[in-house]
Image (cartoon, coloured by chain):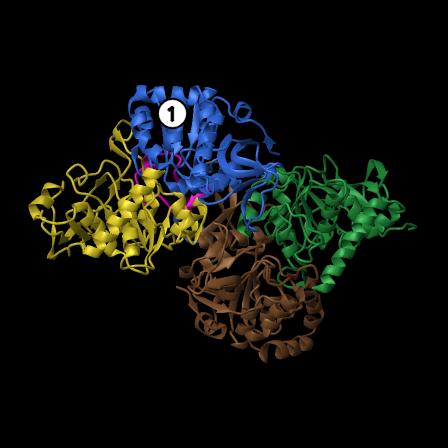
Chain colours: A green, B yellow, C blue, D brown
Amino acid sequence: MMANYKPNEMMTVAAARALRNEDVCFVGIGQPSAAANLARLSHAPNVTLIYESGTLGTKPTVLPLSIGDGELCETALTTVSVPEMFRYWLQGGRISVGFLGGAQIDKYANLNTTVVGDYNKPKVRLPGGGGAPEIATSCGEIFIIMAQGKRSFVEKIDFFTSIGHGSGGDSRQKLGIKTKGPTRLITDLAIYQPDPETKEMIVTSIHPGVTREQIQENTGWTVRYAAQVAETPVPTAQELDILRELQARTARAHAAA
Amino acid sequence: MMANYKPNEMMTVAAARALRNEDVCFVGIGQPSAAANLARLSHAPNVTLIYESGTLGTKPTVLPLSIGDGELCETALTTVSVPEMFRYWLQGGRISVGFLGGAQIDKYANLNTTVVGDYNKPKVRLPGGGGAPEIATSCGEIFIIMAQGKRSFVEKIDFFTSIGHGSGGDSRQKLGIKTKGPTRLITDLAIYQPDPETKEMIVTSIHPGVTREQIQENTGWTVRYAAQVAETPVPTAQELDILRELQARTARAHAAA
Amino acid sequence: MARITSLAEAVQAAVHDGDTVAMEGFTHLIPHAAGHEIIRQKRKNLTLIRMTPDLIYDQMIGMGCAKKLVFSWGGNPGVGSLHRLRDAVEQGWPNALEIEEHSHAAMANAYEAGAAGLPLAVFRGYLGSDLPKVNKNIKRVTCPFTGEELAAVPAHRPDVAIIHALRADKAGNVLLEGVLGVQKEAVLAAKRSIVTVEEVVDDLGPRSLNAVVLPAWTIGYVSEVPGGAFPSYAQGYYARNNSFYKAWDNIARERDTFLAWMKENVLEKGPEAFAQHARKRAAAAE
Amino acid sequence: MARITSLAEAVQAAVHDGDTVAMEGFTHLIPHAAGHEIIRQKRKNLTLIRMTPDLIYDQMIGMGCAKKLVFSWGGNPGVGSLHRLRDAVEQGWPNALEIEEHSHAAMANAYEAGAAGLPLAVFRGYLGSDLPKVNKNIKRVTCPFTGEELAAVPAHRPDVAIIHALRADKAGNVLLEGVLGVQKEAVLAAKRSIVTVEEVVDDLGPRSLNAVVLPAWTIGYVSEVPGGAFPSYAQGYYARNNSFYKAWDNIARERDTFLAWMKENVLEKGPEAFAQHARKRAAAAE
């Protein structure tokens, strides 16, 4: 790939662009936090960022390492308790976008962050669901950020930690879920969106320089494509500058601590 | 009655004396508030007073007219929301003594503050239960303060707003209630306590100068007496001074507002 | 996202005939100015929800705005009865008033459940009380772990919540402090909301990291109405006017004195009439 | 009523072998010093409850204190796995560890319900998740008003809750500020409690009227342990030591490096060792 940016940066930039100024976003640590703050520092200055530690409307100068760094609280409109966060704010239906990621994903964007292998005799014990099971069903829609690979993009996930589109179609509605679920899967190679009928995640945009072969090599199911597949616009110089400055500030702050 | 105090003052003083330094007391407006603060300003300086408006550990200089006067909040350790008050503090079982009163009481200390007459066609529509239904069952024990009279001390109350000892005996336990219920009924004439078996409120102490005839004349059921009936000690000069100063401060403050 | 408008515009836009309306404020921060505006705009057939109906609902009921009242304690605190409420319930004047009666615990839990997006509130309540016999919205659920039977009531989900708060910033973020009551829950539980405030400021200013703030994006309308809680109070602005609460007993006792007072002090006035109460107190404090 | 004692005395009195222990702190105010004291006092067979097990439980599990873990997210935040937790679950070292796994929403609601004296928490959760298949403590209750099926989990009612807070006054009233997590709920839900604080002061000082305060009469033991949250942080005292969280990954990866670190830094030290972290930060800030 000939470019002055890394695939990871393309992924973060593409995720950031999906956020709107009027969104209220439940942010997870890592890539989602970078993407959400890039959005806030570029095209969506009024986007409302919420971290599950209770910080409402936070505007961190550096990215937090943990979900409850002091920086998040000090720059927030206010900070509520964690029970209140999950009752009034998440379950209350006040969040328009939730970000999720995971160790495994299937073509319906169901996620596993619990175990690899059998639950009672795991090959790898992963950290677990945390907020994901209810983020997946309570937020208006879900954006997923994950780098692609055959071990993570699998035909069948070992454990349903949080639901995406279930077994496709009207799976969510049948469970009584009223929210949209994953509307975007943003990877280091492409952007996927759900087929309107089957809800399978299909590629709607390919990042510059990436081939369909590369995408298939890094996906454990047969990848489908939209009728019209776009090329993701390259990160702008401004997007890269803001993202890199944010990450440099973050690295300095975390090293100093 | 030859005395330098009023029956009302005797009632308030007797109620105050029942509070202990280590009590956490859920205080209602009016007589309970006067009694609780008299206790705090005399023999029980560390008694913890809680008002249902959310004020924890409040130390008002003047008595509040309402349950949520600013004075209560400004002198409190802190103030919580009303849902939290009823969930964590009252239902949480953290209150040792609740004060109640009412328009009607029966011999098992069940209270009516809802209606006189039929519920759907009331002769008098009273204010209603407020916090009483759950105060009556969640506090460790209940002190009731009420001036006696045939219209209020009745054989049968028109509506069970809050339970005392139900129909007596183990009524409370049968309903799954684990708290003691009314342990003291303090009137302008006497102090009643529940019979250990039947739970009927029986007179255990008569205020100075009051006769059994007077008590019966002001009670709508046949009054029973403990084997040993005490005479309530007269209010001390100190008790009266503190109470009267408190009430004078209160009158001045409310007139000024 | 909060729109900062006049109170008249806010009521015009957010409160419709037949709505379920929750006006909260637990002694503190009762939205009296908003109640007067609803009376002036002649809203009818409202279902009024409020823990402690108090003077504000006595006025609205007496002026014929309400068809139903959902409440837990309907008195004039420390004074006595609400005469207009009693007249409506006992005599059907000016119209019959349906009542749905709860305990405070039930009402507080129902607001909490509404804010939490749940259909019901579950709590330990009403044991031994007759209220479940006269209110079909009090049911029981069984704990699947212990077998304990608990009380259940429907969550409050009003069409409109109306509260008074201390101040808002220009973006519409609203600060509450002091006796908090159920106001935050009422706003979060409602489809629409109006918040009157003592003042709109550039910045909410220094505050606790855990200050009670309703973000602008949870609120419909914000209106600056200094003194708008009178005769209730606004912590740090003016005190509760206990004398007025006592005086109300005489004003409201008879229909004609009530109507005369409402004409002079509500129908012929506007929200700006409340400013004198904010000012009077501020001056007195100096 | 809170007793102000040394941490060693508090743990001695309040934490017994076989107890169910909740040590909370959501990134902020994690009671690391108390965890070390429990390790030094060699408590065994504990059931450990915590939303985010984190380094503190990685250490306790690796040192053999725990027989069961009730949790919702067991990682090193922003870094990766908890190697001692994984070793216990995957290899049974130093002993097998039973796990009861929930979501954050369930854990937060279970603490809230415990604080509220309820036997269960009811919320909208676990829809489409496999967790109810592997956790028999996740059930459903039906709303009698709407028919909606909601999730139910038992309330947390630990034998002991242990938290770290900013400061206490001499009566034992405790102040929290900043990221609050579920600490207040954990203490109110527990039969006994220990609160370590950065400092014991004469007076809690100027604060919001709605400051988050645990009254002395809701707390068992208060112990002054400056720096006691390290490598977590104490708002206004010292920042989170993100470098230590990253370093822990290497320390805990292998059993021998872990044991060596625990010997040097925990077994051979006392609570006073934490003071350097409070001081270091204070000095650096000047």
Mark count: 1
* Residue A223 horizontal side relative to residue D86, left or right: right
Q: Which residues are magenta?
A: C121-142
Q: Amino acid at mark 1?
A: Ile
Q: Position of residue B5 (x, y in %)?
A: 16, 48
- Front position in the image: D204 or D255: D204
Q: Position of residue D162 (x, y in %)?
A: 50, 64
Q: Is residue C45 above or below residue A108?
A: above
Q: Which residue is mark 1?
A: C61
Q: Tell me which chain the residue with mark 1 is part of.
A: C
Q: Position of residue C192 (x, y in %)?
A: 54, 31
Q: Secondary structure at mark 1?
A: helix
- Front position in the image: B102 or D150: B102
Q: Position of residue C216 (x, y in %)?
A: 60, 37
Asked if one can make out residue C82 in the rendered structure from this viewpoint, the answer is no
Q: Is residue D286 above or below residue B131?
A: below
Q: Quadrant of residue B152?
A: top left
Q: Residues within 10 Å of mark 1 (few under 14, many from 20)?
A: many
The residue at 23%/35% (across/down) is B158
* Residue C145 horizontal side relative to residue D30, left or right: left
Asked if one can make out residue D141 in the rendered structure from this viewpoint, the answer is yes
* Residue D205 horizontal side relative to residue A220, left or right: left
Residue that lies at the very extreme toward the right in this rendered image: A2
Residue that lies at the very extreme toward the front in this rendered image: C286
Q: Is residue C203 above or below residue A68?
A: above
The residue at 49%/72% (across/down) is D7
Residue that lies at the very extreme toward the bottom in this rendered image: D268
For the C terminus of chain C, the quadrant is top left
- Front position in the image: A185 or C51: C51
For the N terminus of chain C, the quadrant is top right
